Amino acid sequence: MKLYGSVTSPYVRKVRVTLIEKKIDFNLEQGYLTGNPPMIDGVNPLGKVPALELDDGTLIFDSAVIVDYLEGLNPVGHLIPEDRHQRMLVKRWEALSDGLLDAAVLVLLETRRDNPAERSQAWIDKQQSKVDRAMAYMSQQLGEKNWCQGDAFTLADISVGSALLWIEFRFPNHNWRKQYPNLDRLVTKLAQRKSFQDTPPQG
């Protein structure tokens, strides 16, 4: 199967880590965000990555749908509980992580406007407050547990790790590790896994 994406995208990283943890072979197809129109438009009508192309040509997007599909594809590396309530809690962690990233990406794009006069500090502050609330909630929910949900490594941990490591990559001055020592401990542990070591953000 082919995974269309970028080594920079945290959403793509979430899928890549999932594929590695589940020992599923794939090819990472990069460069599809270039062109006019971008080539990814021919793969995903929304023009976004990640998108996964199965061997029969079926296309799947976005990251939450892809990881759901992958969980049922291979019993190795069980990442999403079968119990309905526990599954919901794991997926809630994923939604929280993705929402944090959505807001952080908007902050990044706004601060990168060529003309500083066109930047909206009110918009930046609004999105940053979402990031801050999401991190505080993550820390509160994690508490002193070893893993985000339950007593084992799950998609919840992959989602949180992918999000926070991207924040560290794009906003190196953010002090979330000092502010939330329990998140620091979790992410430090995740960074020791081969799946995370093999998928560092670049660019």
Image: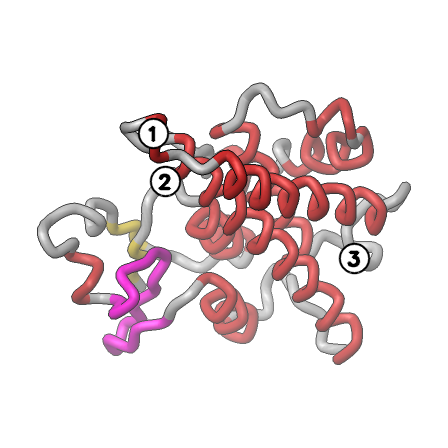
Q: Is residue 132 left or right of residue 182?
A: left
Q: Which residue is mark 2?
A: 7
Tell me the CA gap for discs 3 and 2: 27 Å
Q: Is residue 63 left or right of residue 131?
A: left
Report the coloring of the rendering. secondary structure
On screen, residue 197 above or below 106: above
Looking at the rendered image, the quarter that the C terminus falls into is top left
In this orientation, which residue lies closer to the viewer: 1 or 48? 48
* Residue 54 percent coordinates (x, y): 31, 71
Q: Which residue is mark 3?
A: 149
Residue positioned most to the front: 117
**Which mark's residue is nearer the viewer, 1 or 2?**
1
Q: Kindly identify the residue that appears in the image at 35 percent across and 26 percent down.
A: 116
Q: Secondary structure at mark 3?
A: loop
On screen, residue 188 above or below 83: above
Labels 1 & 3 near each other (Cβ < 8 A): no
Amino acid at pointer 2: Val
Residue positioned most to the right: 144
Residue 52 inside the magenta-drawn segment: yes
Tell me the CA gap for discs 1 and 3: 31 Å
Q: Which residue is mark 1?
A: 203
The part of the chain drawn in magenta is 44-60
In this orientation, which residue lies closer to the viewer: 140 or 28? 140
Amino acid at pointer 1: Gly
* Residue 186 percent coordinates (x, y): 74, 37
